[in-house]
Image: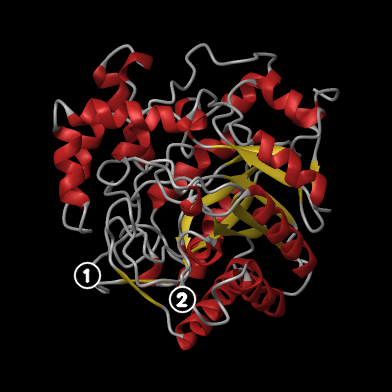
Amino acid sequence: MPDDPIFEPLRFRNLEIKNRILRSNVSGRFDNYDGSGTQARINWELKFARGGVGAIISSFVPVTIQGRIVPNYATIDRDECIPFWRELGRKVHEQDCKFILQLSHSGRQRDIPGVEFGSGLSSTDQDEELHGFPCRAMTKNEVTETVTAFAEGARRAREAGLDGVELHGANGYLITQFLSSAINDREDEYGGPLENRARFVREVVGAIREKVGPDFHLQMKISAVEHHNVLDFFPDKKRAGNTLEDSIQVCKWLAEDGVDAIHVSSGSSFPHPTNPPGDLPLEAAVRTYDIMASSGSRTFANYKSLRSRLLGPLLRRAWIKARGETIEGINLEASEVIKAAVPVPVLCTGGFQTASVIRGAIEAGRCDGVTIARPLIANNDLVKMFSAGKDRPDEPCTYCNKCLAHAAKNPLGCYEESRFRSHEEMIEEIMTVFDPPPFSTSG
């Protein structure tokens, strides 16, 4: 469709993709406990590459074992990881799709910490607020080691033949914990004014550029507005966290430092009412949240609240109220302002699944492209639907968030049974991620 801006190539400084739709960072626990990758992850990514997206942004890929959110996610913490990512990239490239690896570190936000490390590393000694995950403030030596770990992760991604990397600086993970005025309470050169709070991520960008050079794609995902206080009973503006103006300045600095694109999200935690925008699926959450019950000081109380016939519905209503009315394009206002302020392309995430909405956002200069996760889980071939002239899928994503509620415990997939003819059909579709299997016993 040559006249459709959705299908115009998106050109970055060091990378070009065939259209304006990227699969956003999402994946299930498809890998081995030690961080080595599996065939199931390759199968997962190929679903979207075959469906027509221009590029895939990998799921959260830890640069250290201590920085993972849950076990059974493939990592990029050692050179032994390179062959797996090389094979995954090769398979995705066969579908005329690019692959961008997301360099990540959980900091204090660790849903299931694993057996190796009891406490998370952060910008602060204060436990994570939603779940009460424990942490301690990083020493300066640990800050330096972590900066190096990000740079080494970028080097490994380049050696694997991947097309670029993204820094996960959004949604409450480690980079957010340094950037955020609501979380970072340090009194050294990494805390206090915005310039100091941005020092960590700017050092990461500098170290990556020193390691991989100026010609390897590097982008940054940022929570443009943190809304840190939205779940407070009495919201305190002092606890709101970074504003859009703060993030604009950070993005300007990052562009000066050599970042090739900005990826706009929102929220100071994951999950957060504004990310992923949608429902709080009580039944699914009760079935799966128990796996986190011992992870933090508030997790067991949260579990009991979700199960409560009184408190559960109250929490759900508060969550939806904090989200607001908008789901599709929830971050477009922020991305439009950031795009006007920086000289690099801007990507926007937030429930996109309607071609006319995406097309309108690009034509109006509100973003250069969009990233999609849940609607692509619901309809892997969404981009092919758009190319065939369909504006919206016949069975669209309902934003129920059951997929993400199940992700910590069960295979990732669409768990909205109303979209299938039967429960059995739903399960069959979810299990396709294990086909083909990692080895054959034939013969």
Determine contact: label 2, label 1, CB under 8 Å.
no
Q: Where is residue 131 in the image (x, y as percent from the top left)?
A: 28, 53
Please name the residue shown 53% across and 51% down the image.
58
**Residue 283 visible somewhere in the drawing:** no
Q: Which of 319 and 48 is in front in this view?
A: 319
Please name the residue shown 22% across and 40% down the image.
288
Q: Where is residue 442 in the image (x, y as percent from the top left)?
A: 28, 46
Please name the residue shown 55% across and 43% down the image.
24
Indicate the amino acid at tag 1: Val
The mark that comes first in sequence, 2 or 1, is: 2
Name, please, the residue furthest toward the bottom.
Answer: 141
Q: Where is residue 191 in the image (x, y as percent from the top left)?
A: 54, 74
Please name the residue shown 65% across and 13% down the image.
390
Marks 2, 1: nearer the viewer: 1
Indicate the amino acid at tag 2: Arg
- Which residue lies under the disc numbered 2? 78
Q: Mark 1: which secondary structure? A: loop
- Snapshot quadrant of residue 250: bottom right
Q: Nearer the viewer, residue 160 or 314?
A: 314
Quarter of the image with the N terminus is: top right
